[in-house]
Amino acid sequence: MGLGVRAAPFTYVAHALAVVAAAMVLYWCIHFRGGLAFEAANKNLIFNVHPVLMLIGFIILGSEGNAENSSTFLPRGFSFVCKILSILAAIMVYKVLPTVNHDTTKLIHLILHAIALVLGAVGIYCAFKNHNETGIANLYSLHSWLGIGTISLYGIQWIFGFLAFFFPKAAPNVRKSALPWHALLGIFVYILALATAELGFLEKLTFLQSSGIDKYGPESFLVNFTALVVVLFGASVVVAVVAPARLEEPQGYAPIPEN
Ligand code: HEM
Ligand code: HEM
């Protein structure tokens, strides 16, 4: 797509928003919801692992990129956080490490997507564990259906990516024609994950508000603003992926020539 803008500034915005969203979801689950646990008498603590792993492990890890360039003008503490996040590069890796050897970025891309997939699966397991240990029914909501769909498509996308581009590798002409589809479906499944997380925030907050928390209280604002930050974060990731790493690069879209 000939957007006429470079990906880099959007990767900086994405980093900043990723740090903010991660801090907000942790603050919510630890300060307001009592903390996180895999085993506990208070089963709510097991549930709390779910939003934290889905947002930080699945969505942010699946999309975060390198802050190498941004670190020169960012405050020290923030650039340190970005350095850590820079190790966590999956969808955006080709845009945030444009000068790094392609085989290396490919390897980072595939390993980080694998880690995101595993953390996502553990996060979903915690939601099921909480339901099973408290006698709540499973898979009754649109959120949970989209969640299962998202993680399944993500797994399929990973297997196809691995077979086509890594091992045993499809023939060059097949790889060439499969790549735009891989990128398109990758962005699609990523947006699906964002939508699922939005429904998750809405659903959980609605449960909490129905059970008595103040609709205009600090926790309600925190959850709604976290969900808003996640929307802005997702938008910046999508633009960073669609925009070219360098402006002089050939663009994926060309106008249809007139007869
Ligand atoms: C892409 C990210 C996410 C995925 C793939 C996902 C997936 C799922 C799945 C499959 C379940 C069903 C568990 C069961 O039936 O036992 C579930 C439950 C739940 N999730 Fe998520 N989730 C995500 C993010 C979130 C977030 C960020 C929140 C925010 C709090 C959240 C809140 C909930 C709630 C309240 C439930 C229990 C109610 C229900 O089953 O719908 N989820 N999630
Ligand atoms: C669920 C997992 C995956 C998702 C969501 C995903 C998503 C994406 C996206 C959105 C792009 C476009 C990036 C850009 O143009 O900046 C891309 C490119 C690519 N992906 Fe994946 N991917 C996944 C797994 C894999 C795996 C396992 C491999 C195996 C090596 C792979 C290999 C590639 C390659 C070679 C490119 C092209 C890079 C280039 O433009 O030169 N992907 N992927």
Image (cartoon, rainbow, N blue to C red):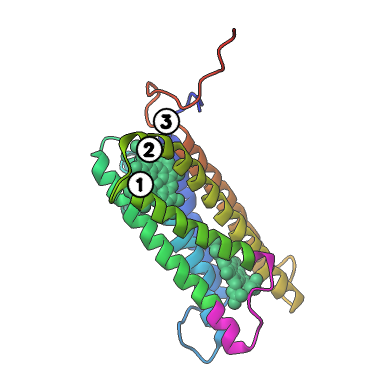
Do the residues under discs 2 and 1 have CB atoms within 8 angstroms? yes
Spot occupied by residue 27 in the image (x, y as percentages of width and height): 52, 68
> Height in image: 47 above or below 56?
below
Q: Which mark is residue 164?
A: 1
Mark 3 and mark 2: span between their CA atoms? Answer: 23 Å
Amino acid under disc 3: Pro
Q: Is residue 74 visible?
A: no
> Height in image: 200 above or below 82?
below
Q: Is residue 129 visible?
A: yes
Q: Residue at x 50, y 78 (%)?
A: 35
Amino acid under disc 2: Val
Residue identifier under label 2: 174
Q: Please tell me which of labels 2 and 1 falls first in the chain.
A: 1
In the image shown, does 51 or 126 lie closer to the viewer?
Answer: 126
> Height in image: 159 above or below 129?
above
Q: Residue at x 37, y 27 (%)?
A: 246
Ligand 2 lies in quarter: top left
Spot occupied by residue 3 in the image (x, y as percentages of width and height): 51, 26
SS for dot 3: loop
Residue identifier under label 3: 244
Whether ligand 2 has any atom under 8 Å from the Cβ at mark 1 is answered as yes
